[in-house]
Amino acid sequence: MPSLPSDEKRNRGIYLLPNAFTTANLFAGFYAVVQAMNGRFEIAAIAIFLAMVFDGMDGRVARLTNTQSAFGEQYDSMADIISFGVAPAFVMYVWALQDLGRWGWLAAFVFVVGAALRLARFNTNIAVVDKRFFQGLPSPAAAALIAGFVWLAVDNKLNIAATPLSWTAFALTIYAGVAMVSNAPFYSGKSFALGRSVPFWVMLLFVLLFVFVSSNPPLVLFSLFVLYGLSGWVVMVWRWRKARRLSHQRKQEL
């Protein structure tokens, strides 16, 4: 059997890199489900955040190595629906929502179907939407809201048996699910693309961000994603007010 040229071998090896990160993303989501079944909710929440890290790396690795593929895009979507759809809903349901009866599993299902619709819409609209903004809350950010809330509550030893906390979990789950299928524009960060080398101030910013998050990871991460989860509505209102003002000015000119 003839051996493959060295360049072809190298290219086949490179194509494994982004898919390896996608597999790590999928494993982290699966691991979160397993840990939730074992009652280790803090570890389950951390696993979902790790899935976010791997999900952010696979696309960047593919672009840096020029190894984008249709297979990778589909595989990434399949992994995302597990890690950012099923896993967060399952963790939240087992931790807090199951005590609410049918309202609990309905809230979990709203989150799962919201993530599925969000990913399907993203895949079909990827070439036509403004790349600076996501249409609807991204599923990783929605998963971070759920995981961050669970992690913060467990870390502070809050009693989930308390009814207000269960209904707070219910409201947050419904909000995240609905926000994913909304038309609110959430900043994508794609305009801030990093190349193979970065300025010194970027490295300094990453160090400061790491120190800030390390000071109290559950509180800081949950707070950051709450702000991000509300930012889309702020942008939507700002755009609406701007469009209304322009429309009023045009009417006056006529």
Image (cartoon, rainbow, N blue to C red):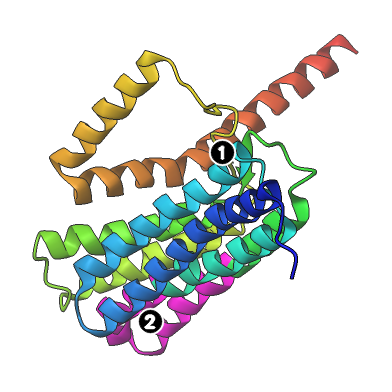
Residue at image position (32%, 61%) is 147
Secondary structure at numbered mark 1? loop
As drawn, the residue found furthest toward the bottom would be: 101
Horizontally, is 79 left or right of 28 in the view? right
CA–CA distance in space, label 2 to label 1? 31 Å
Q: In the picture, which quadrant includes the C terminus?
A: top right
Q: Mark 1 points at which residue?
A: 188
Residue at image position (55%, 42%) is 60
Horizontally, is 216 left or right of 92 in the view? left
Residue at image position (25%, 35%) is 210
Q: Name the residue under label 2.
A: 104
Q: Quadrant of residue 151?
A: bottom left
Among the two numbered marks 2 and 1 on one chain, the one whose residue lies closer to the N terminus: 2
Does residue 145 appear in the picture of this structure? Answer: no
Magenta extent: 88-115
Image: 90 above or below 18? below
